[in-house]
């Protein structure tokens, strides 16, 4: 319930904030009082303990319950204060650089959506504090299924797939945000976790032509980078142009793979494939050598079972 109350604080006064806190207190503690009395009655009826002793136990349990509730409420209040400070800092920053109101509202929606999506938790800080092997396992658990849906990536071995998963970063987009515009450079691939994107194209502004599809959970966009990544002469200075316009039609959570990270993985894949190809050629050549030796041995064999020099 707290996550429905918090957004209302974004433009509230101090009095409004105090009323909200009072509401939270009531929501947290009143139901607990209603739970305590039936519990006390059951204790007395089932054990036959005198009311005085039962009430002593009930008071003790109530104190423990209130203590636990107080700790929970304190953590919520800390989050609310963090939210209030972040909103205040954002508003002061937008005021300082004199942004237009329409752009300010878009920023407010994004900040609110990010807060609600992460519950105010700094996920990146938590991940970075974990050992490397645990971070890899977490990224693999979250991303491997999405990555394997790309045909080019499906050909890679587990080591390269792990390298891709390690380089994926979380990405949040609010409704009506443009992920890419037709003709603009493509700087990243996106793998959708939640939400929907509209991907449309006019094929370079061709008159009377329009094609549109909806991308959902498990889909990806930015595939123009795949061809770019495997070419040896390409760099981040000549990124490919987007062939489609991609726009968020709902709030979207995704993982993003930057162009330079994709280039690195594609280069490693080509190098490994080249080594495998060279190894295959060596195996074939060895087989041919063995066959030539066997043919010579057959030619040199004498019908009587003897051998001649050849």
Image (cartoon, helix red, strand yellow):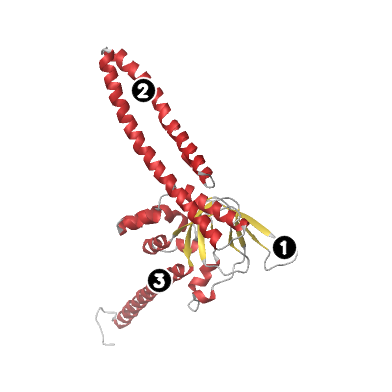
Residue 298 rendering spot, x and y as whole percentages: 32, 79
Q: Identify which residue, 49 or 150, lies in the foreground.
A: 49
Residue 244 rendering spot, x and y as whole percentages: 62, 63
Q: Residue at x 57, y 51 (%)?
A: 196
Q: Residue at x 41, y 42 (%)?
A: 77
Residue projecting furthest to the front:
15
Residue 215 rendering spot, x and y as whole percentages: 58, 54
Q: Residue at x 62, y 56 (%)?
A: 101
Q: CA distance from mark 1 to mark 2?
A: 68 Å
Compared to residue 235, the image places residue 143 above or below, namely: above
Q: CA distance from mark 1 to mark 3?
A: 39 Å
- Badge 1 or badge 3: first in the primary sequence: 1
Number of marks in the rendered image = 3
Q: Identify which residue, 6 or 214, lies in the foreground.
A: 6
Name the mark nearer the viewer: 1 or 2: 2
Q: Residue at x 67, y 59 (%)?
A: 211
Secondary structure beneath label 1: loop
Q: Residue 32 has which mark?
A: none
Q: CA distance from mark 3 to mark 2?
A: 64 Å
Residue at which label 1 appears: 209
Residue at which label 2 appears: 36
Q: Is residue 194 left or right of residue 121?
A: right
Q: Identify which residue, 89 or 79, lies in the foreground.
A: 89
Q: Are marks 1 and 3 in contact (CB under 8 Å)?
A: no
């Amino acid at each position: 319930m707290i996550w429905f109350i918090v957004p209302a604080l974004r433009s509230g006064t101090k009095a409004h904030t105090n009323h909200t806190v009072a509401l939270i207190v009531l929501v947290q503690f009143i139901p607990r009082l209603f739970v305590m009395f039936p519990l006390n009655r059951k204790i007395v009826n089932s054990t036959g303990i005198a009311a005085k002793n039962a009430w002593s136990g009930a008071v003790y349990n109530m104190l423990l319950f209130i203590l636990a509730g107080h700790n929970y409420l304190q953590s919520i209040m800390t989050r609310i204060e963090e939210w209030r400070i972040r909103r205040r800092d954002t508003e002061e920053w937008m005021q300082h650089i004199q942004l237009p109101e329409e752009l300010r509202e878009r920023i407010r929606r994004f900040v609110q959506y990010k807060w609600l999506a992460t519950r105010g938790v700094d996920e990146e800080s938590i991940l970075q504090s974990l050992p490397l092997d645990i971070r890899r396992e977490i990224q693999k658990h979250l991303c491997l299924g999405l990555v394997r849906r790309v045909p080019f990536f499906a050909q890679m071995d587990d080591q390269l797939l792990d390298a891709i998963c390690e380089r994926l970063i979380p990405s949040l987009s609010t409704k009506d945000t443009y992920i890419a515009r037709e003709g603009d450079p493509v700087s990243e691939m996106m793998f959708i976790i939640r939400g929907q994107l509209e991907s449309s194209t006019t094929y370079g502004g061709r008159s009377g032509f329009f094609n549109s599809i909806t991308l959902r959970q498990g889909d990806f966009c930015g595939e123009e980078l795949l061809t770019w990544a495997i070419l040896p002469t390409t760099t981040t200075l000549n990124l490919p142009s987007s062939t489609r316009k991609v726009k968020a039609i709902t709030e979207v959570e995704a993982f993003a793979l930057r162009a330079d990270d994709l280039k690195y993985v594609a280069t490693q894949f080509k190098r490994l494939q080249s080594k495998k190809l060279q190894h295959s050629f060596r195996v074939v050549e060895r087989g041919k050598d063995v066959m030539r030796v066997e043919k010579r041995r057959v030619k040199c064999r004498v019908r009587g079972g003897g051998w001649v020099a050849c």
